[in-house]
Image (cartoon, rainbow, N blue to C red):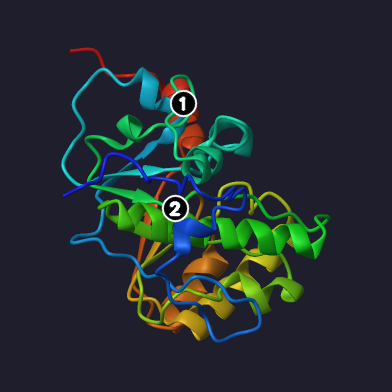
Amino acid sequence: MKKSVLKKPTDIKDVFGAFLVENAQFSTGKYDMPVVRSNIDELPTSLFSYQKVGKRKLSLPPRTALHFFNYDYIFDGKYGIWNALIRGVEFERGFNLKKLEGFDCIIAPDFSLYLDMPLAWQIWNVYRSRVVVYALQELGYKVIVNARWTDVASYEFCFEGIEEKSIVAVGSYGCSNKLEDRKLFDSGLVELIKRVKPDAIVIYGTITDSMKDILEKNNQKYYVFRSDTSVAMEEHCHGNESK
């Protein structure tokens, strides 16, 4: 049974959203991340972008996952998912739980990490992703944990809190344009497999030969979903067959 909304305590001014993880377990590592694991029944067979939720007109195919592999301003900010959860409100033109209706599961928000971000900011975004997983699962939703990293300095916190053998989603979109970006992504993928030992990895975006090599050498089960942009580009270039 899904709850309608998370009720924020009225007797304290909890601007940090501590009530969201009141009953959570925390990692034994350095950063006290909420411990989470994906709680889905079946792996998704299709993904749907949060950016397009208001534009959908057709019924969704079975086992469709809602994903947040979008620019942060689309799902974060004043009326985004984080503020909606910690304030215990549903924004009419921002995030509300109605946007999750009809989906078999949700991939946790992909709060961005960049190399030029201060580490404190990177840690905060990883923490927020873990909290959203826990909070949505407490509300009764099926959620896939998302992993994001930058360079070696991020490894000590970016995988913390993800239980071993959990299913994990990663976004490779935009990480394969430059050689340096590909190297950083590949290095983090190796570390993810080593530390988390995922039952399966759901990949949104491009899969390179080097990624395939890493996954296959580690006998890692994975599923690839092309990015919305690449699908749109192909349709634009080749057109749709007339019936």
Q: 86 above or below 196?
A: above
| 97 sits left or right of 51 in the view | left
The answer to whether any part of residue 146 appears in the image is: no
| 42 sits left or right of 52 in the view | left
The answer to whether any part of residue 115 appears in the image is: yes
Q: Which quadrant: the C terminus?
A: top left
Marker disc for residue 108? 2
Q: Identify the residue at image location x=51%, y=33%.
A: 229
For mark 1, does the 10 Å Cα neighbourhood hold few (<14), some (14 to 19), or many (20 or more) residues? some
Q: Nearer the viewer, residue 109 or 178?
A: 109
For mark 2, does the 10 Å Cα neighbourhood hold few (<14), some (14 to 19), or many (20 or more) residues? many
Q: Identify the residue at image location x=76%, y=74%.
A: 153
Q: 182 above or below 16?
A: below
Name the image quarter holding residue 97.
Answer: top left
Q: Identify the residue at image location x=34%, y=31%.
A: 99
Residue 3 point in image, percent of width and height: 25, 45
Q: Type of residue at label 2?
A: Ala
Q: Nearer the viewer, mark 1 or mark 2?
A: 1
Q: Type of residue at label 1?
A: Phe
Q: Are marks 1 and 2 in contact (CB under 8 Å)?
A: no
Marker disc for residue 91? 1
Marker disc for residue 155? none
**Which of marks 2 and 1 precedes in the sequence?**
1
Name the image quarter holding residue 208.
Answer: bottom right
Indicate the secondary structure of the residue bearing disc 2.
Answer: loop
